[in-house]
C-alpha cells in the first residue's frame, strides 16, 4: 500500500487548523500565524486571501509573511 505524502497546501492548512484549535481551547480567539520558510508563497497568499474573504475572521496583516487572525465565537441568541 502506498500512502501519498500530503501536499504543501494540505500541510499548511493542517498547521493553521492546529494553531486555531489551540487558540480556541485557550479562549484567545486570536492567533498570529507566520509563513514557514518551507511553505510555498503562492499557497500562503491563497490561504490568506481566503481568510480575508471570510466574514467570520478578521485578518490583520503584520508583514507580508505574518498575519493576526481574530474571531468571535457564534452566539446562541440566548440570554445568560
Image: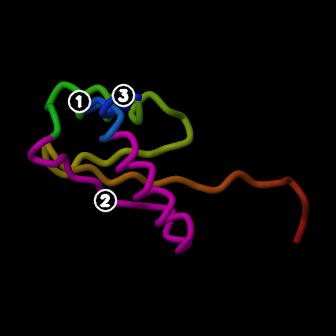
Question: In the rendered image, which quarter is residue 5 located in?
Answer: top left
Q: Check if residue 35 falls in the magenta segment.
A: yes
Taking depth in this image into account, of 21 and 59 the one nearest to the observer is: 21
Contact, CB < 8 Å: mark 2 with mark 3? Answer: no
Q: Which mark is residue 32?
A: 2
How far apart are labels 2 and 3 at the CA level? 36 Å
Q: Residue at x 14, y 31 (%)?
A: 41
Determine whether the residue tagged by mark 2 lies in a helix, strand or loop: strand
Q: Nearer the viewer, mark 2 or mark 3?
A: 3
Determine whether the residue tagged by mark 1 lies in a helix, strand or loop: helix
**Where is residue 6 shown, x and y percent of the image?**
33, 33
Q: Residue at x 23, y 34 (%)?
A: 44
**Where is residue 11 shown, x and y percent of the image?**
31, 40
Q: Check if residue 32 falls in the magenta segment.
A: yes
**Residue on which disc 1 sits:** 45
Magenta residues span 12-38
**Mark count:** 3
Question: In the rendered image, which quarter is residue 43 located in?
Answer: top left
How far apart are labels 2 and 1 at the CA level? 15 Å
Q: Residue at x 44, y 28 (%)?
A: 53
**Where is residue 27 shown, x and y percent of the image?**
56, 71
Mark 2 or mark 3: whose residue is earlier in sequence: 3
Contact, CB < 8 Å: mark 3 with mark 1? Answer: no
**Residue on which disc 3 sits:** 2
Q: Is residue 54 left or right of residue 5?
A: right
Q: Is residue 69 left or right of residue 24?
A: left
How far apart are labels 3 and 1 at the CA level? 31 Å
Amino acid at each position: 500500500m502506498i500512502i501519498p505524502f500530503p501536499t504543501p497546501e494540505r500541510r499548511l492548512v493542517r498547521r493553521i487548523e492546529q494553531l486555531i484549535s489551540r487558540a480556541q481551547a485557550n479562549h484567545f480567539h486570536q492567533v498570529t500565524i507566520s509563513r514557514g520558510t518551507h511553505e510555498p508563497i503562492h499557497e500562503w497568499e491563497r490561504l490568506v486571501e481566503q481568510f480575508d474573504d471570510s466574514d467570520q475572521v478578521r485578518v490583520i496583516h503584520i508583514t507580508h509573511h505574518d498575519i493576526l487572525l481574530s474571531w468571535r465565537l457564534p452566539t446562541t441568541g440566548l440570554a445568560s
